[in-house]
Image (tube, rainbow, N blue to C red):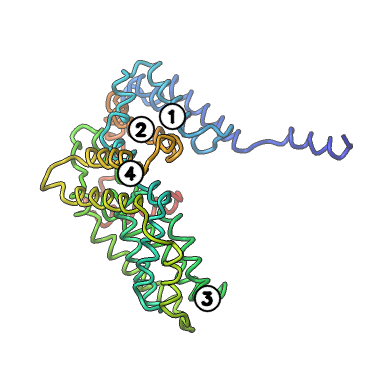
Amino acid sequence: MSLSAIETSLEQQSSINPKLILFWLFVIAGLLVGFLNPWSPALNPLGHKVLMGLIIAVGLWVFKPWDIPFSVTGCLLMMIYLVFGITPDKVFSGFTSSALWVLLPALYFGYVLVKTGLGKRISYLVIKAFNPSFISLILAWVVIGLLLSALTPSITVRVAIVMPLALSCVEVCKLEKGSNGRALILLTAWAMALLPGTGWLTGALWGPIVMGMFNATPGLDGVITFSSWSKAAFLPIEIMSVLLIIGGYFVLRPEEGISVSKEVFEGEYAKLGPMSREEKVTGIILLLCFLFFATGQIHHIPDAAVCLGGLFALTAAGVIKTQDLSSGISWDLVIFVGVAMSLGTVFASAGVSQWLSSVLVPMLAPITGNSWLFCFCCNILSAYLEIP
């Protein structure tokens, strides 16, 4: 080994990893909270231990000093809670929540959209229905975003389907890199895959997650449903989407037009070939699931039952294979979400929720009387903390 290589190796070994330092600061802070009980007697010793575990886990989740998966850190957190006396039914409550069993099949719904090619076919089917122009392509991406949001809650899956198609679209339209027209199409496609679906419960993964956290909180069980979520979020989200589209068009209004004909997009669709049996089955099952979600107040079948039935139907029809069950979705995400959903029950049983209420309610009282002011302050705080 050369002298320079040895020096480089020594420099790498002696270099200080700032993430590791920050993680150990979290560990120290957690241990101090857990064993010094700084908020006693308002918070009991068990509550301090619960906060200790959470602080250490947050350090691992944020800084990932040894690339430990989120799920394994969640397992460590559950171990800490069990060691300090939290009962198993509380620690594992997130995994028995109906919300997790909405999320789990819904992840497979996104997987089969990609696996079968149905998501790509739907997108091209919509695009070829319009005469090529910037206005029509914007409308096409709106329709595509709404359709894909109805079929899968995974924004990641929707973006993975839409963005390659959007890139292919701007190439077919011969829109140059750096041009306003290219930016308008790409940004609109991305935004429509992201935003409109959040107006209903199953249009984004955080819908089932929030529902699970509410259900785990005493007195809030059943507050979040497909209907209640839509009543609160659908209109504001869709208005926001419309304003975003209009604003984007005026800001990035292209000077040039689109010179390609409708037949070009029809040719791209023809390259996909005839619709396969798997695509047809997937489309029918996912459409039925969405209709059951939207009409829950009529038939009263739980969303979890609908999702589990959809997963069974896709598997029985041969769309989902045995090997897909292990590789089709991120189990790291599923376990992490299950742990997160358990926190509400753990906090309530350890007295942390009551203590936080006594601290936070007086602090937030000046702004909670006005819902608009409260939402505005939350948005400012989220932007300041860079919360996605």
Q: Secondary structure at mark 3?
A: loop
Nearer the observer: mark 2 or 3; the answer is 3
- Of labels 2 and 3, earlier in sequence is 3
Look at the image and tell me whether residue 213 can be seen: no
- Picture coordinates of residue 95 (x, y %)? 32, 29
Rounded to the nearest angstrom, the CA distance separating label 4 from label 1 is 22 Å
The reply to whether discs 4 and 3 touch (Cβ–Cβ < 8 Å) is no
User: Three-letter amino acid code at disc 3?
Assistant: Leu
Q: Quickly name the residue at label 2.
A: 338
Q: Residue at point 44% right, 19% down? A: 35
Rounded to the nearest angstrom, the CA distance separating label 2 from label 4 is 15 Å
- Of labels 4 and 3, earlier in sequence is 4
Residues packed near mark 4 inside 10 Å, few (<14), some (14 to 19) or many (20 plus): many
The answer to which image quadrant residue 365 occupies is top left
Q: Quickly name the residue at label 3.
A: 175
User: Three-letter amino acid code at disc 2?
Assistant: Gly
Q: Secondary structure at mark 4?
A: helix
**Nearer-the-camera pick, 335 or 354:** 335
Rounded to the nearest angstrom, the CA distance separating label 2 from label 3 is 45 Å
**Nearer-the-camera pick, 170 or 249:** 170
User: Three-letter amino acid code at disc 1?
Assistant: Gly
Q: Quickly name the residue at label 4.
A: 106
- Of labels 2 and 4, earlier in sequence is 4
Q: Residue at point 56% right, 75% down? A: 176
Q: Quickly name the residue at label 1.
A: 74
